[in-house]
């Protein structure tokens, strides 16, 4: 797969994970839920050497942080 396709898949995964995190952040205990999910996804991505899973976990954290700090 070409590098452009990989990068576009990573960008789409990042944007979708940010959107999902923003929706989840409306619920109680969202920070804890997203932190646990992001940690698990990141560790699985690191074990399988999947950059896409690592990008998704970072997107979850940044999406939650955007809603928590910015509003």
Image: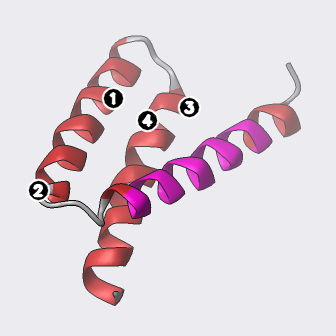
The local secondary structure at tag 1 comes to helix
**Which quadrant holds the N terminus?**
top right
Provide the secondary structure element on which disc 2 rests: loop
Q: Secondary structure at mark 3?
A: helix
- Cα distance between the residues tagged 1 and 2: 18 Å
Q: Which mark is residue 29?
A: 2
Mark linked to residue 54:
4
Going by the image, does 13 lie left or right of 41? Answer: right
The residue range painted magenta reads: 8-23
Residue 52: which disc? 3
Which of the two discs, 2 and 4, labels the residue nearer the N terminus?
Answer: 2
Q: Closer to the observer: label 2 or label 3? A: 2
Q: In the rendered view, would you say 9 is above or below 19?
A: above
Callout 4: helix, strand or loop? Answer: helix
Name the residue that disc number 1 marks: 41
Q: Is residue 71 above or below residue 6?
A: below
Do callouts 4 and 1 mark residues in contact (Cβ within 8 Å)?
A: yes
In the rendered view, does 46 fall on the left or right side of 6?
A: left
Q: Residues within 10 Å of mark 4 (few under 14, many from 20)?
A: many
Does label 2 or label 3 sit earlier along the sequence?
A: 2
The residue located at (39%, 51%) in the rendering is 60
x 78%, y 43%: residue:
8
Pointer 4 and pointer 3: residues touching (CB < 8 Å)?
A: yes
Query: Residues under labels 2 and 4: Cα distance?
Result: 22 Å
């Amino acid at each position: 797969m070409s590098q452009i396709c990989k990068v576009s898949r990573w960008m789409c995964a990042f944007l979708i994970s940010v959107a999902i995190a923003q929706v989840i952040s409306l619920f109680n205990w969202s920070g804890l839920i997203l932190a646990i999910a992001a940690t698990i996804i990141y560790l699985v991505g690191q074990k399988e050497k999947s950059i896409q899973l690592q990008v998704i976990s970072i997107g979850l954290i940044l999406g939650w942080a955007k809603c928590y700090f910015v509003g």
